[in-house]
Image (spheres, rainbow, N blue to C red):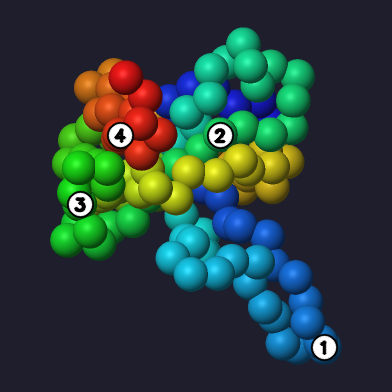
């Protein structure tokens, strides 16, 4: 799937079967698990022709917001016309940025407003100490 900067996609991190019915998630500590929206933050020119992209997950636990976990009201999410996902006030977890395999994306559900993208960029700037 081709992905675009600022696009919102449903993604579920990979799982590794440990035994027959038992599944162990490939995550530890505070890493986000489960199906959730991710925003693609890598530039279009960088990810063109690749099957990976840099993405930031969202949570609806708005109490997690701080200087690098960016609170975004539902109005900043622009839903694709055929998307069934209902957006709510959310937090971009910029400290949980990850490289995702775009072939594992379930579907595109919309995009973030320009103001929302800028806010997430500021969160990433803080996390990475970019001046």
Query: What secondary structure is found at the residue carrying circle 3?
Result: loop
Separation (CA) of disc 1 from disc 3: 38 Å
Query: Does 87 sit left or right of 21 as displayed?
Result: left
Instruction: Between residue 74 and residue 38, name the one nearer to us.
Output: 38
Does the CB distance between marks 4 and 2 fall below 8 Å? no
In whole angstroms, how far apart are the C-alphas of marks 3 and 2? 21 Å
- Of the residues tagged 1 and 3, which is closer to the observer? 3
- The residue singled out by tag 2 in the image is 54
Foreground tag (4 vs 2): 4
Residue 110 in sight here? no
Q: For mark 4, what is the residue?
A: 126
In the image: residue 61, left or right of residue 124: left
Q: Is residue 53 visible?
A: yes
Quarter occupied by the C terminus: top left
Q: CA distance from mark 4 to mark 3?
A: 14 Å
The answer to whether residue 41 is left or right of residue 63 is right
Q: Position of residue 119 (x, y in %)?
A: 25, 29
Q: Which residue is mark 1?
A: 20
Q: Residue at x 49, y 22 (%)?
A: 5
Query: In front: 39, or 121?
Result: 121
Residue located at (75% from left, 70% from top) = 16
Q: Position of residue 87 (x, y in %)?
A: 30, 47
What is the CA distance from the residue labelled 1 to the residue labelled 4?
Answer: 43 Å
Q: Earlier in the sequence, mark 4 or mark 2?
A: 2
- What whole-number distance in Å separates the C-alpha atoms at marks 4 and 2? 16 Å
Q: Position of residue 111 (x, y in %)?
A: 39, 29
Please say if the residues under marks 1 and 2 sit with CB atoms less than 8 Å apart.
no
Q: Secondary structure at mark 4?
A: helix
Mark 4 closeness class: few <14, some 14–19, many ≥20 residues within 10 Å: some
């Amino acid at each position: 799937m081709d992905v675009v900067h600022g696009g919102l996609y449903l993604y579920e991190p990979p799982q590794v079967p440990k035994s027959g019915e038992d599944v162990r998630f490939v995550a530890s500590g505070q890493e986000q698990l489960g199906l959730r929206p991710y925003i693609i933050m890598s530039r279009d020119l960088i990810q063109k022709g690749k099957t990976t992209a840099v993405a930031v997950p969202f949570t609806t636990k708005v109490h997690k917001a701080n200087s690098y976990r960016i609170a975004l009201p539902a109005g900043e999410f622009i839903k694709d016309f055929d998307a069934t996902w209902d957006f709510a006030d959310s937090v971009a977890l910029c400290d949980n940025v990850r490289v995702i395999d775009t072939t594992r994306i379930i579907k595109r559900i919309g995009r973030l407003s320009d103001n929302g993208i800028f806010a997430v960029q500021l969160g990433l700037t803080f996390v990475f100490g970019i001046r």
